[in-house]
Amino acid sequence: MDFKSKIRVVEDFPVKGISFKDITTLLQDGEAYAAAIKEMAAMVETLEFDVVVGPEARGFLTGAPLSILTKTGFVPIRKPGKLPYDTIQHAYELEYGTDTLEIHADAIQEGMKVLVVDDLLATGGTSKAVCELIEKLGGEVAGLAFLIELDFLGGRALLDGYNVKSLVHYND
Ligand SMILES: O=P(O)(O)OC[C@H]1O[C@H](OP(=O)(O)OP(=O)(O)O)[C@H](O)[C@@H]1O
Ligand SMILES: Nc1ncnc2[nH]cnc12
C-alpha cells in the first residue's frame, strides 16, 4: 500500500519551519491502519522480543496494536505525573522543544527483550530516552520500529548500534 498517500503533511505546525507528518488521516482509514500495523509486524518478524514499549501519545497508536498482533505485552511510557506507581524519568530534546518521559520502575525485568515502537523517528531524542529508560531497568533493546522516519534529521545516527526499522521515509 502507498502509505504516504494516506499521511497528511501540514506545513509550519506546530511552529514555523516544521513539516508535520499527520498520521490521523491514515488512522481513520481502517484498511490503511490495519495494513500499516501488519507491515510493521512483518518488518520486525526476525527480531526476538518479549514486550513492546511505546511512548505517549502516538507510540500508543502504533505500539499497542503491534503488541496485540505479535501477542506480546505492551508497556506505556508517559509524560511526567501520569503513571500511578514508582517511576524512573529521563529528560530529552525534541525537534521543537524539550520533554521528560517516565516508565513504571517494575515494568521491565532484568534481561527482558524489548521492541520500541513509535509513529515517527525525527531527531531520535524520544527514542534514545526510551532506550535509556529500558536499559536503566536492565532490559535489552531488541530493536526499534517506526511507521515514519524523517531521514533528513539523522535520528538513526543518534540510535547508532540499535536495530532501527521504518516503513515510510521522508527527505523533507
Ligand atoms: O525523534 P524525535 O525528535 O524525538 O521526535 C519524534 C517524537 O515526536 C512525536 O511525539 P511528541 O513528543 O510530539 O508527542 P505526542 O506523541 O504526544 O504527539 C512523535 O510521536 C515521536 O514520539
Ligand atoms: N515533523 C514531524 N511530524 C510529525 N511528528 C513529529 N514529531 C517530531 N517531528 C515531527
Image (cartoon, helix red, strand yellow):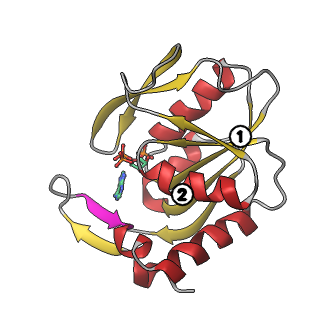
Where does the image place residue 111, in percent across and percent down from the top left? 82, 26
In the image shown, does 63 or 45 lie closer to the viewer? 63
Query: What residue is pinned by disc 2?
Result: 62
| Secondary structure beneath label 2 | helix
Give above or below for 60 relative to 83: below
Report the disc number at residue 122: none
Give above or below for 163 relative to 147: above
Residue 47 appears anywhere in the view: yes
* Image-based side of 168 in relation to 136, left or right: left
Outermost residue to the top? 86
Quarter of the C terminus within the rendering = bottom left
Quarter of the N terminus within the rendering = bottom right
What range is drawn magenta here?
18-23
Q: Amino acid at mark 2?
A: Thr
Do the residues under discs 2 and 1 have CB atoms within 8 angstroms?
no
Is disc 1 surrounded by few (<14), some (14 to 19) or many (20+) residues within 10 Å? few
Q: Alpha carbon of mark 2 to alpha carbon of mark 1: how far?
A: 23 Å
- Residue drawn where x is 17% and y is 61% of the image: 12
- Residue drawn where x is 79% and y is 45% of the image: 49
The number of numbered badges drawn on the structure is 2
2 vs 1, front mark? 2
Where does the image place residue 114, in percent across and percent down from the top left? 72, 39
Outermost residue to the front? 84
- Residue drawn where x is 35% and y is 75% of the image: 25
Give above or below for 2 relative to 34: below
Report the disc number at residue 161: 1
Dominant SS in magenta = strand
Counting residues from the start of the chain, the first of labels 2 and 1 encountered is 2
Is disc 2 surrounded by few (<14), some (14 to 19) or many (20+) residues within 10 Å? many
| Secondary structure beneath label 1 | loop
- Residue drawn where x is 79% and y is 21% of the image: 110
